Amino acid sequence: MHRHQQATRAPQPVAAAPRPTPANKLTTSEEALILETLNSERFIDQAPEQIDAVLLSEGTHLCSVSTMHRLLRREKQVAERRQQARHPARKVLELVVYQPGEVFTWDITKLAGPAKGTYFDAYVMIDIYSRYIVGYQVHARESGELAREFMAQVFATDQIPKVVHADWGTSMTSKPVAALLADLDVLKSYSRPKVSNDNPYSETWFKTSKYLPVFPERFGSLADARDFMDRVVQAYNGHHRHSGIGFHTPADVHFGMTGHVEDQRQAALQAAWDAHPERFGQRSLPKKLQVPEAAWINEPMKLEEREEMIAV
């Protein structure tokens, strides 16, 4: 009501007065002459700046260069004539796993050293199903040979996966790493260039660790960085309750020890249900407390969604 009353009392907008024709406006015949000149055999392949320079050198002034561009845009005669590269859209990566040990993802992150401009390199490999860190190392530099040694140690300690996923870093695509994976018959998988979502597990863990209150601004030495990584990885694997795996620890999921924990949770809920049945609408373990059936990098579309896309 108030808005309606205010609108009726508000002054009505004054109709805009007709704008006078600019004194410098080109006539239709002048515009036609300009376009005829620009499209002539002599100037058809030259830019307006070049045409204007040539005409001025000959003692002729048609119009300004900006007017030439404006008329060409109006006539839709401005376009890129060179042959441009057309990069096809890259196929979205889809990896799905149903148990630990199938797909490992790894990456390297920088740790600030004792002085400005000095860094240490942390190599970290994660099982994408259990989120368990299967291996990590900290070195003073990054190289393909160090990456190969790191991966060989991980495979000897844990197990050899079916697929190893990484981004397009120089160490990830180096010859030593490629040779090792080929010898072990491990498939290589890479993220799309400049798409961090294709390597979410590594990127998320780096952010989780670097946002810890105890994460130092700088490490005093390589030994300090290695000691810190030891403590962080042990705490993460053995004590961190990860929401993506039913709030279990990565170690419990990786080594198949979640059954006992789920039995305890179920027993606690059962006691609560029996004591106060009126407080619960359903009697089942919440989905967020269960280990998911699968893990993936870029969840595959369902069959119905694929058929719908094809139909469109």
Image (spheres, helix red, strand yellow):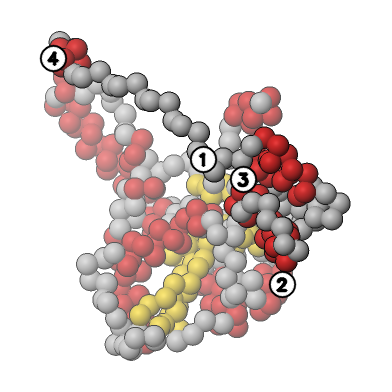
Residue at far right of view = 41
Q: Horizontal and vertical percent for residue 142?
A: 52, 81
C-beta proximity under 8 Å, tags 1 and 3: no
Q: Residues within 10 Å of mark 3 (few under 14, many from 20)?
A: few
Evaluate whether residue 88 shows in this view: no
Front residue of this view, candidates 18 and 124: 18
Q: Residues within 10 Å of mark 2 (few under 14, many from 20)?
A: few
Tell us which disc is closer to us: 4 or 2.
4
Task: Give how far apart the Cα atoms at labels 1 and 3 are.
Answer: 18 Å
Q: Residue 197's spot in the image, x, y percent?
A: 50, 53
Q: Where does the C terminus fall, quadrant-wise? A: top right
Residue occupied by mark 1 = 23
Callout 3 secondary element: helix
Which of label 4 and label 3 is nearer to you? 3
Q: CA distance from mark 1 to mark 4?
A: 48 Å
Where does label 2 land, which residue?
183
**Residue 146 relative to residue 124: left or right:** right
Q: Which mark is residue 70?
A: 3
Write the residue at 43% across / 65% down: 133
